[in-house]
Image (tube, rainbow, N blue to C red):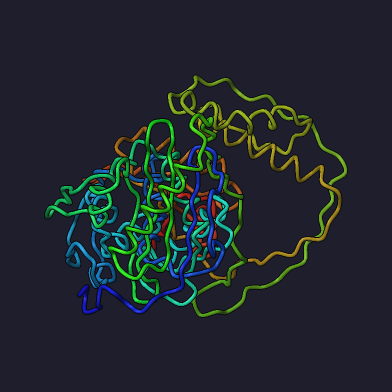
């Protein structure tokens, strides 16, 4: 029995795919594009995004998660987290990867995106960027939910990306057990890892609707194979089928194929929807604006300032924006005070470029929604960092990438016991909400800060 369910459950729909991990070539497929319940194979995406967030500096492995009631209430398999408890991200990652802990998966998603729903949206954006065309995620753990579906092909693609995009973390999936902070956890895939030569991951999954699922990878010499099974009837029969498929892959795969790693995901610059003015649903005024500027002046010269360490470190990030700003034959530039900071000089230059680009655009009718909701007492937080330098760097980069909604806001680094928080203040509620939506669409951590 497993959580009250016989280990030989009613057969779920079967699907399988075998891939040469080095080349991405499919060596065998059965129902590989049929949308089925992925169960805890979902956690591969949760962990992929966690690795991505760590590498991008959005979060750190030693950053503590404050466990929500929602996360603590997830059904087994779970680590046993309590609402209000604090646990390091690295320990939750281990529990989600090795024990398949649902409470940890939810806690990870809430930490990174603010809520499980927001995290699910990020999961779906990432899936799209990875080429997972028939996958829809609704949660971070994989428990059965209407519309939460994937395919053997998509999960194999995801497993390949986990392997090649984050090799520094991949060894986690081969551990037989690990320290998850509050206790040791054992690997749900330890039987196959022990029984099959060269097996070193990746993820198991089981629900009544899904059956017994597994994405497994094994390496022998220069060859590496990934095999995926959906709808196994039991742990033993699923493992036997995966071993059979891995054998098939090693027989078919060429010995010395050249490794062609998958492309890292490229995310589209999505924008959020036009928002209502407040939570009551009252619409703002809609004004039609027609603008056309026929002439422009050359930009005024600006005082020279000493480069700051933040700008030096971010020279690659702002190179493109500066190039455009310097090449445009326009003015529309606000006068910069001599005592302005170097960071402000860069932002002013880039804003000039944006305004100039609008000046040169042919006449067009623009429909926009103007706020009627009042004061600018809201803000947004774009992360907590280990140093003031990192926080200032994040603020500058965010301001450069999201000038449309953050123009005129106040950048502020706030020192907290856990680190340095990077905030933008002086926004209206709807402007803060829109800024967060636009940033989250580009996979930037963001949450709103209310008045006071």
| Residue 339, x across and y down, in percent | 50, 28
| Residue 222, x across and y down, in percent | 43, 31
| Residue 287, x across and y down, in percent | 73, 68
| Residue 260, x across and y down, in percent | 54, 34
Viewer-side residue, 288 vs 121 = 121
Classify the position of the N terminus by image quarter.
bottom left
Residue at the location (39% across, 76% down)? Answer: 11
The answer to whether residue 276 is visible is yes
Viewer-side residue, 54 vs 260 = 260
Residue at the location (44% across, 60% down)? Answer: 378
Q: Residue furthest front?
A: 251
318 to 122, vertically: above or below: above
Query: Which quadrant would residue 107 be assigned to in this image?
Result: bottom left
Residue at the location (76% across, 31% down)? Answer: 328
Residue at the location (27% across, 67% down)? Answer: 71
Viewer-side residue, 251 vs 298 = 251
236 to 390, vertically: above or below: below
Asked whether, in this view, residue 258 is left or right of residue 234, the answer is right
Classify the position of the C terminus by image quarter.
bottom left
Q: Residue furthest left?
A: 183
Query: Which quadrant would residue 96 be assigned to in this image?
Result: bottom left
The answer to whether residue 435 is visible is no
68 to 154, vertically: above or below: below
């Amino acid at each position: 029995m497993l959580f009250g369910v016989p280990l030989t459950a009613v057969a779920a729909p079967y699907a399988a795919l075998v891939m040469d991990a080095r080349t991405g070539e499919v060596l065998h497929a059965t129902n590989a594009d049929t949308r089925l319940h992925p169960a805890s194979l979902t956690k591969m995406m949760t962990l992929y995004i966690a690795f991505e967030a760590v590498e991008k500096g959005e979060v750190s492995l030693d950053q503590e998660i404050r466990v929500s009631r929602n996360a603590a209430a997830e059904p087994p398999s779970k680590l046993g987290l309590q609402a209000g408890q604090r646990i390091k991200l690295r320990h939750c990652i281990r529990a989600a990867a090795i024990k398949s802990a649902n409470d940890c998966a939810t806690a990870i998603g809430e930490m990174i995106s603010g809520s499980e729903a927001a995290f699910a949206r990020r999961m779906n954006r990432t899936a799209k960027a990875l080429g997972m065309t028939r996958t829809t995620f609704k949660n971070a753990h994989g428990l059965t939910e209407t519309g939460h579906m994937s395919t053997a092909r998509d999960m194999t693609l995801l497993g390949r990306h986990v392997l090649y995009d984050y090799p520094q973390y991949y060894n986690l999936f081969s551990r037989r057990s690990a320290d998850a902070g509050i206790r040791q956890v054992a690997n749900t895939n330890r039987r196959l890892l022990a029984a099959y030569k060269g097996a070193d991951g990746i993820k198991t999954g089981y629900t009544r609707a899904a059956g017994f699922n597994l994405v497994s990878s094994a390496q022998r010499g220069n060859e590496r194979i990934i095999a995926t099974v959906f709808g196994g009837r039991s742990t033993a029969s699923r493992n036997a089928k995966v071993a059979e498929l891995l054998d098939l892959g090693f027989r078919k795969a060429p010995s010395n194929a050249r490794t062609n790693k998958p492309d890292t995901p490229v995310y589209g610059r999505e924008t959020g929807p036009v928002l209502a003015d407040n939570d009551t649903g009252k619409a703002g005024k809609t004004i039609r604006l027609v603008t056309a500027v026929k002439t422009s002046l050359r930009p005024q010269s600006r005082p020279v300032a000493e480069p700051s360490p933040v700008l030096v470190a971010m020279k690659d990030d702002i190179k493109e924006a500066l190039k455009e700003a310097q090449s445009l034959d326009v003015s529309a530039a606000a006068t910069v005070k001599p005592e302005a900071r170097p960071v402000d000089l860069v932002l002013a230059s880039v804003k000039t470029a944006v305004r100039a680009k609008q000046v040169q655009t042919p006449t067009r009718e623009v429909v926009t929604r103007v706020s009627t909701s009042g004061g600018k007492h809201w803000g947004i937080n774009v992360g907590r960092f280990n140093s003031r330098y990192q926080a200032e760097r994040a603020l500058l980069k965010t301001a450069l990438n999201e000038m449309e909604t953050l123009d005129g806001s106040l950048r502020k680094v706030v020192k907290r016991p856990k680190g340095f928080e990077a905030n933008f203040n002086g926004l209206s509620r709807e402007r803060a909400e829109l800024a967060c939506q636009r940033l989250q669409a580009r996979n930037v951590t963001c949450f709103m800060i209310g008045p006071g």
